[in-house]
Image: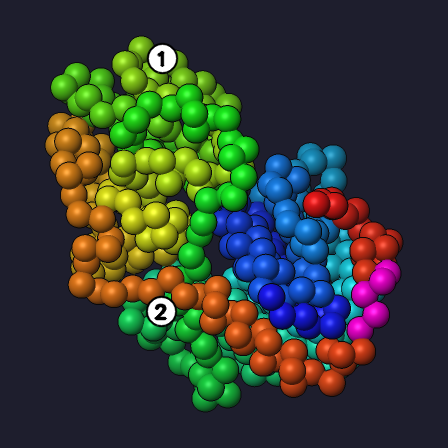
Amino acid sequence: MKRLNDARILMYSHDTFGLGHLRRCRTIAHALVDRFKGLTVLIISGSQIAGAFDFKARVDFVKIPSVIKLYSGDYTSISEHIDIHDTLAMREALIKETAELFEPDIFIVDKEPMGLRGEVEKTLIALQARGCTTVLGLRDVMDSPELLQEEWEKKGVMNKLPDLYDDLWIYGPKKFWNPLLGMDVPDAVREKVRHTGYLQRDTPTSDSNPQIHMLPEDYILVTAGGGGDGADIMSMVLAAREHDRNLVYPLVLVPGPFMRHELREDIHRRAANLRSVTVIDFDNEFETLMNGASAVVGMCGYNTFCEVLSFDKPTLFIPRTKPREEQLIRATRASELGLTQVLDSDQAADPEKMADALHQLPHSPPPSKSESNIKLDGLQIICKRVEELLAMSPSSNQVDGSNLMHKATSAATVESNPG
């Protein structure tokens, strides 16, 4: 473990839907503090359940007011008594004040270049004026080129990237996909792009998950990620079991914390009438559940894909296609490379076809049998790049970290793990 003289990294995760952004930031933050003694990471998160996760020592988060993204693309406040414009104004002010008091050496923004409704743009400008290094981190797949181009043009993103960001990291290998494919990317942006490779996941070092000891052997894990749009995949799998009673592999269904109550209750009711079907609403150590599975059924969100590769599980993906085509593109590309299997939603909605796919799944080859040689070295590459950036920063050796969390607490509520 190397020492970086009390360097500070601030991360921003807008978190309007699901768990993907926070979990990705948390994974990167944990890798950084494991690698560098003296480094502290503070995550700004809009997730409603950020406090449900454990954070390592020297990783904390600031909770900003949560908002929900609707299928129409509009946003609404969690509280019906607070206007969305007031909520967004509070978020922007808290982000900027936290950054000013925390004084990071590096600011890493996840996925949204200007933040939700542009809420980090002023913070980016202020931090760059102080000499802070700014980084934009993008998923391996963002959306179809046409839809991403339209979204970024409305926000003027491509014109702002050269001035607001020093680095642009793509969290995936170049050979898998380029999220900027088909877009008119200026040379000033293109030269800042770095593919990191996928982010490897590990099981917690402590044996602290009691649920894993109560699960059957050789189960198929069915995951809906955060669950906000995962009811269909759960229903399709249950319909296949209801149709074909010869499906003997135990199922463990994880609907996720954001599934609507009535849909979750329906899943529990149907599962109770089937043999060897277990429902776990949410587990903050999901990696343990993934590691114990014999195979996986999922939607092909970014984190699920990294976990499937990390734990080398035969996997069937049933991707959503709206409002983004991200999952469809990732699942299709993974199937082309022989890493996983894919079934479109129309096929999966047929109980007989879904049952056939479940029969075959445990006997399918895991990702390691593919000849694609997709590497999971993203965290190592990120750590190396952070070390390079801090070495170039004139302020990195002059940071006084003694009042680190005290200063951030005065900006907003900090949920802390003293461990």
Q: Residue furthest top?
A: 273
Where's residue 366, x and y in %?
22, 48
Q: Which residue is mark 2?
A: 173
The local secondary structure at tag 2 comes to: loop
**Real-space Cα distance between discs 2 and 1?**
42 Å
Amino acid type shown at disc 2 = Pro
Query: Observer-nearest residue: 303 or 263?
Result: 303
Query: Observer-nearest residue: 140 or 398?
Result: 398
Where's residue 28, x and y in %?
54, 59
Amino acid type shown at disc 1 = Ala
Q: Which residue is mark 1?
A: 272
At 41% across and 66% down in the image, what residue appears?
377
Q: Residues within 10 Å of mark 1 (few under 14, many from 20)?
A: few
The quarter of the rendered structure image containing the C terminus is: top right
Question: Which image quadrant for residue 163?
Answer: bottom right
* Residue 304 in view (yes/no): yes
Q: Which mark sits nearer the N-terminus, 2 or 1?
A: 2
Measured along the vertical axis of the image, is residue 263 above or below residue 178? above
Most common SS among magenta residues = loop
Query: Observer-nearest residue: 301 or 218?
Result: 218
Residue 48 among those drawn in magenta: no
At 85% across and 62% down in the image, what residue appears?
402
Where's residue 328, x and y in %?
30, 53
Please state the extent of the stretch shown in magenta in the rendering. 399-403
Left or right placement of residue 66 versus residue 409 in this view: left
Left or right placement of residue 109 versus residue 131 in this view: left
At 86% across and 61% down in the image, what residue appears?
403
The local secondary structure at tag 1 comes to: helix
